[in-house]
Image (cartoon, rainbow, N blue to C red):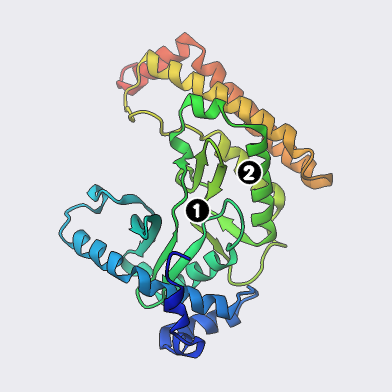
Amino acid sequence: MIGIETVSESLEFETIISSPCNTHLLEYIDDTDIDIDKEELAELLAHYTAFTPAIKKLQEELKKSDSHKEHPNFLGSGSTCEVFAIELDERQFAVRIPTGKFTSPDIINTYITSLMSGKGISHLEQIIAASCTEGITISELINGKDSGKMNLREIRDITDSQIEDFIDLLILTYQKNITVDYKPSNILYNRDSGFSIVDYIVSKNNNTEEDKLEDIIKMGAQTIICFGFYTGEYKKEMDPEDYKNKLLLFKENLKVLKRYKSLLKSKIEGDTLLNSLDEINLIIKSYRQNIKNHSNSKWIKTQIELSKGTE
């Protein structure tokens, strides 16, 4: 793997794990219901050494920057971290650097443990290396586009096979107790490989009995109606052409949602299926109302007047 095997081979398991920070991580894992291979974890922690020069270079550049978002390698940010791309051995990786109060050991341990739980699962972000001390994780960079920024052609190109893979992934995250933040930037789309998920966590103790699969299926449906949500520049005051473009987007998303609903029938059954279909039908009903509104010139005119603060 990326020329770093020699690093892990030169460090014994006990040496890697014995640091106070890593020991705390092991104690955290032992106190959970999550099955983590300790040898694999030690290897992952050892891999971090190979990335240190690139990360230090990135951190020095960020110190000189007034806005981290202006850095050419900036990928995104959330409530707990900022994400940047780095390169090693001609391969691209995503580096998550915690921000502010989110450098606490428990938060770091949760994140490392969560990504370890997703290792080997296709279409889930795959962790490569981590540092408990710095709270930094490094993952394979997924070649995909923020689903909220998909264009009409990309939405039309979504295949049934890709929708089925997405459903399978949702079911697997439920079975593995993986919690996903279903915002568009965490659901990536690639025309060739389909959908992938980044930035997920696993709760410290298994709580899948409290959750319902139909809730996860509903989140998948809500993800679909957000395809292309951020397409184009945000406008506080929209004109008729903007509403026309939104109408086209709504219609394409509804087509995908109907396919999603139909394909579910081969994936789940019983009450879970019935409850999921009921939830999706409610979303479809609401979405059809959006389409009806955006097809109505009088409604559009009213919205434009309201946005301008006129009666």
Q: Residue at x 35, y 74 (%)?
A: 134
Q: Secondary structure at mark 2?
A: helix
Query: What crowding class fits label 2: few (fewer than 14 Cα within 10 Å), some (14-19), or many (20 or more)?
Result: some
Q: Amino acid at mark 1?
A: Val
Tell which of 270 and 16 is nearer to you. 16
Tell which of 237 and 242 is nearer to you. 242
Q: Which mark is residue 198?
A: 1
Which part of the image, by quadrant, shows the C terminus?
Answer: top left
Q: In the drawing, does residue 161 fall left or right of residue 101?
A: right
- Using the rendered view, name the quadrant where residue 58 is placed: bottom left
- Using the rendered view, name the quadrant where residue 88 is placed: bottom left
Residue 131: % across, % down: 40, 74
Q: Amino acid at mark 2?
A: Phe
Vertical placement of 183 versus 111: above or below? above
Q: Mark 2 touching mark 1, by CB under 8 A? A: no
Residue 288: % across, % down: 60, 22
Q: Residue at x 43, y 35 (%)?
A: 149
Q: Which mark is residue 166?
A: 2
Vertical placement of 265 versus 128: above or below? above
Residue 178: % across, % down: 60, 60
- Using the rendered view, name the quadrant where residue 137 is placed: bottom left
Which residue, as the protein is rendered here, is positioned at the far top? 297
Q: Secondary structure at mark 1?
A: loop
Q: Which mark is residue 285?
A: none
Which residue, as the protein is rendered here, is positioned at the far right? 270
Vertical placement of 158 versus 239: above or below? below
Residue 62: % across, % down: 21, 59
Determine if residue 215 is in view. Answer: no
Q: In the drawing, does residue 235 fall left or right of residue 282?
A: left
